[in-house]
Image (cartoon, rainbow, N blue to C red):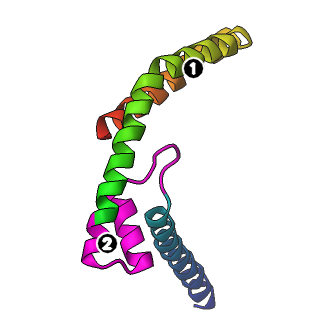
């Protein structure tokens, strides 16, 4: 009987740990942006509005400013994209020269995934 209580106690502690880990992970994910992905315009305006206690007029003005800055940065990325792609392609080619054949296959898969992620991010902008 005592052995079952010990086993159930360990299982209970494990389950509580899993639940706590899930709650903490969820909170961290909510407050952090995925790597390489900037916050959306709405997130920026919302955070500034909350943190600075902006009134309606201020929020509207900040929204215009944030949208304008976003559009300017998007245009700059479009202009610089060919150069960025060239740098990435060159770096990938140089990396491939130091890899073994089986590593090259895995590297090509990684590059394809990275490219998909960039395309998804670009479509979101």
Estimate the x, y position of residue 39 in percent, counting from the top left.
Answer: 42, 54
Relative to 102, 118 lies left or right: left
Q: Is residue 83 left or right of residue 92?
A: left
Residue farthest bottom in this picture: 2
Q: Which residue is mark 1?
A: 88
Residue in view at x 50 percent, y 76 percent: 15
For the point 62% across and 10% down, the residue is 93
Label 2: how many Cα within 10 Å (few below 14, some 14–19, many 20+): few
Which range of residues does the magenta coloring cover?
Answer: 33-60
62 or 109, nearer to the observer = 62
Question: Of label 2 and label 1, which has the lower sequence position?
Answer: 2
Q: Whole-Å distance between the Cαs marked 2 and 1? A: 41 Å
Q: Secondary structure at mark 2?
A: helix
Q: Is residue 32 magenta?
A: no
Find disc 2 in the rendering and name its residue: 58
39, 69: nearer the viewer: 69
Type of secondary structure dominating the magenta stretch: helix
Secondary structure under the numbered disc 1 in the rendered image: helix
Quadrant assignment, res 26:
bottom left
Q: Quadrant of the N terminus?
A: bottom right
Residue 59 picture location, percent across and down: 30, 70
Q: Position of residue 113 (x, y in %)?
A: 46, 28
């Amino acid at each position: 009987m005592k052995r079952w209580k010990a086993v159930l106690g360990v299982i209970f502690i494990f389950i509580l740990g899993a639940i706590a880990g899930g709650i903490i992970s969820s909170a961290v994910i909510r407050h952090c942006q995925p790597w390489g992905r900037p916050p959306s315009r709405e997130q920026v305006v919302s955070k500034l509005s909350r943190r600075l206690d902006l009134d309606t007029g201020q929020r509207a003005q900040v929204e215009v400013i944030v949208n304008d800055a976003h559009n300017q940065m998007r245009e700059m990325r479009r202009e610089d994209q060919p150069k960025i792609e060239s740098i990435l392609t060159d770096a990938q080619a140089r990396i491939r020269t130091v890899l073994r054949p089986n590593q090259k296959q895995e590297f090509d898969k990684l590059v394809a995934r990275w490219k998909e992620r960039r395309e998804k991010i670009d479509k979101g902008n």
